[in-house]
Image (cartoon, rainbow, N blue to C red):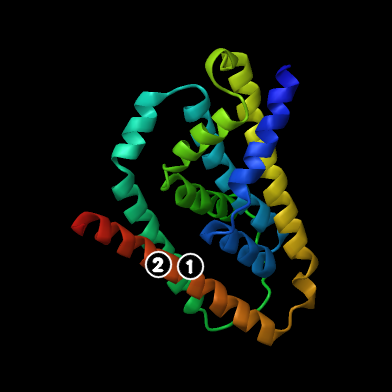
Amino acid sequence: MLFVFFLKGIAVGIVIAVPVGPVGVLCVRRTVFDGRLFGFISGLGAASADTLFGIIAGFGLTVVADLLLDYQSWLRGAGGVFLLYLGASALGKRAVRLEKPAKSAENLFGAYLSTFVLTITNPVTILAFLGIFAAVGFTGAEATLPRAGMLVAGVLGGSLLWWLGLSLGAGLFRSSFRESHLLWLNRGSGAILTLSGIGLLISLLYDKLA
């Protein structure tokens, strides 16, 4: 029975991770320009944040959930500013080519931390987890601590499967990109990140003025 909840968790993790947003764009971008390892580590940062949200929802940590939701405007604002920085950095690159970066712990941790921060600045995901957990039968008498543990473990596994597949898939085409392709990919990803940041900040301003 516990294994069933693990499988449900895998499905939930994939469902949460699949929607393509700024983090997905960042993961693909890093895979193409820096290699599969950087792309996967970026995905790992997002998976860690999603798992943290899953823990909060699955184990009923309402105090933590309420605290994050109370400060969601500040968190989303920080996320918007960070997206603007990432987008501007991409658009500001003069030379666009495939890199062979030193795979140092510092560089990899930076890739991990950036996507973790971007994901954690959207605490509304907790509400999505609560809804999906209820939909898969994790409610009432079914919501025991062992089942919550298996469900959350599955969420991590499912999210990692998605990011691994995305980084490996994007990596397959890495060597086939020409300089002109890389130029447009750089501009496109930078524009998406920048516009995502602008859109997020405008939505926050609208909410404040409404």
* Label 2 element class: helix
Residue 101 appears in which quarter of the rendering?
bottom right
* Secondary-structure class at tag 1: helix
Percent x, y for residue 85?
41, 66
Return the residue at label 2.
Answer: 84
Mark number, residue 193: 1
Residue 3: image x %, image y %? Answer: 74, 22
30 on left or right of 4: left
x then y, percent, for residue 151: 63, 27
Q: Is residue 110 above or below residue 32?
A: above
Residue 52 seen in this snapshot: no
Q: Residue at x 54, y 40 (%)?
A: 50
Q: Is residue 201 left or right of residue 19?
A: left
User: Are the residues flagged by discs 1 and 2 in contact, CB closer than 8 Å?
Assistant: yes
Q: Is residue 184 left or right of residue 87?
A: right
Q: Residues within 10 Å of mark 2 (few under 14, many from 20)?
A: many
Residue 114 in view, yes or no? yes
* Rendered view: 104 above or below 141: below
Q: Is residue 38 rendered to the left or right of residue 174?
A: left
Q: Tell me the quarter of the image containing the C terminus.
A: bottom left
Q: Position of residue 34 (x, y in %)?
A: 66, 65
Residue at the image point whose x is 68% and y is 82% from the top: 181
Question: What label sits on residue 107 in the rendered view?
Answer: none
